[in-house]
Image (spheres, rainbow, N blue to C red):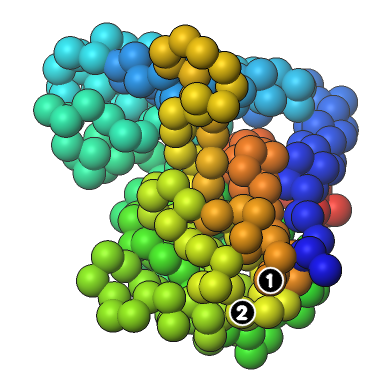
Amino acid sequence: MSGALIDGEAIGLRIRERTAAAVATLAQAHGAVPALAVVLVGDDPASQIYVRAKVKNTQEAGMRSHAHRLAADAPEAAVIALVAQLSADPEIDGILVQLPLPEHIDEARVLAALDPAKDVDGLTALSAGRLLLGKAGLRPCTPTGCVILAQSVTRDLTGAHCVVIGRSILVGKPAALLFLEQNCTVTIAHSRTRDLAALCRSADILVPAVGRPEMVRGDWVKPGATVIDVGINRVPAPELGPGAGKTRVVGDVAFAEAREVAGAITPVPRGVGPMTRACLMRNTLLAACARRGWETPGGLEG
Ligand code: GUN
């Protein structure tokens, strides 16, 4: 029997619809709507697709969207100046700097210019520190989405062994802390971990976030486990017919094999990806409420 499919598109849509309803109510009450600024530096094709989707979702939720696109060779000072300007702009509630930035730009210096009150990606030192300390704050979107997807399978994650593969600041580290917050026993695995396959086989919840196509094989998965695949990898797809450049998107998990063993599993695409955008919409609303002194609407949970 194959594992259940976790529908990130449907779960994400529900969060976006609830966010949109709350935005409409707040617009009636206050005559204003939240605004999200997205900063994209360079022309990485995947980042361009992500940013377009974020802009579209923001508008669909009834919020204002401001996309700032800078050339790949934009000086670091120009990016920092833009982020500082958006931070100071009272009309902007949320700022997202799409990562990765071009190599000549220091990510940490750019994030240091971002007002933590507008940090809808949860990436500033203050947001990360609040997460570590267990204090309320804006949480990173992709890891939050992973927890919501795992909870869609098992509401109470208490005591589950969660293995996160990857230690990035965008996903691995915050995901580990968010699963810990849900009373999971958490292991962070990475490229130097010994016998990764055996470790993964001990996971009730497996969260690969490494960017290596189909690295996690079926026999790495504990029977009945929940698999949340964060990977989005473009690979050659000769099976799509002749001609160069045909590609398809796969996760970090060999999906068909893993599904045979798992209790539940996210597909790629339509798994974690839509949850990142849904949580971004919700964070933008939450940031706007906190900044503007509006009462935070209830019922935003998935
Ligand atoms: N690049 C890939 N995913 C993300 C994300 O969630 N946030 C940002 N800022 N950049 C990304």
**Residue at numbered disc 2:** 222
Q: Position of residue 185 (x, y in %)?
A: 53, 86
Q: Disc 2 residue type?
A: Lys
- Vertical order, 69 against 183 (above or below): above
**Residue at numbered disc 1:** 261
Q: Position of residue 109 (x, y in %)?
A: 19, 39
Res 263 quadrant in image? bottom right
Which of the pair 52/196 is nearer the observer?
196
Q: CA distance from mark 1 to mark 2?
A: 7 Å
- Vertical order, 10 against 6 (above or below): above
Q: Position of residue 136 (x, y in %)?
A: 56, 64
Q: Disc 1 residue type?
A: Val
Q: Of helix, strand and loop, which one carries label 2?
A: loop
Q: Is residue 106 left or right of residue 89?
A: left
User: Would you call the spot at circle 1 few (<14 residues within 10 Å), some (14-19), or many (20 or more)?
Assistant: many
Camera sees residue 115: yes
Q: Please identify the residue farthest to the bottom as the structure is shown.
A: 159
Which of the pair 229/112 is nearer the observer?
229
Res 57 quadrant in image? top right
Labels 1 and 2 touching (C-beta < 8 A): yes
Q: Position of residue 37 (x, y in %)?
A: 50, 23
User: Would you call the spot at circle 2 few (<14 residues within 10 Å), some (14-19), or many (20 or more)?
Assistant: many
- Vertical order, 49 against 234 (above or below): above
Q: Is residue 17 left or right of residue 135?
A: right
Q: Is residue 264 left or right of residue 87?
A: right
Compare marks 1 and 2 and give the one earlier in the sequence. Answer: 2
Q: Of helix, strand and loop, which one carries label 1?
A: helix
**Quadrant showing the N terminus:** bottom right
Task: Name the residue rendered at 82%, 42% in the picture.
Answer: 10
Task: Name the residue rendered at 50%, 25% in the picture.
Answer: 238
- Vertical order, 191 against 11 (above or below): below
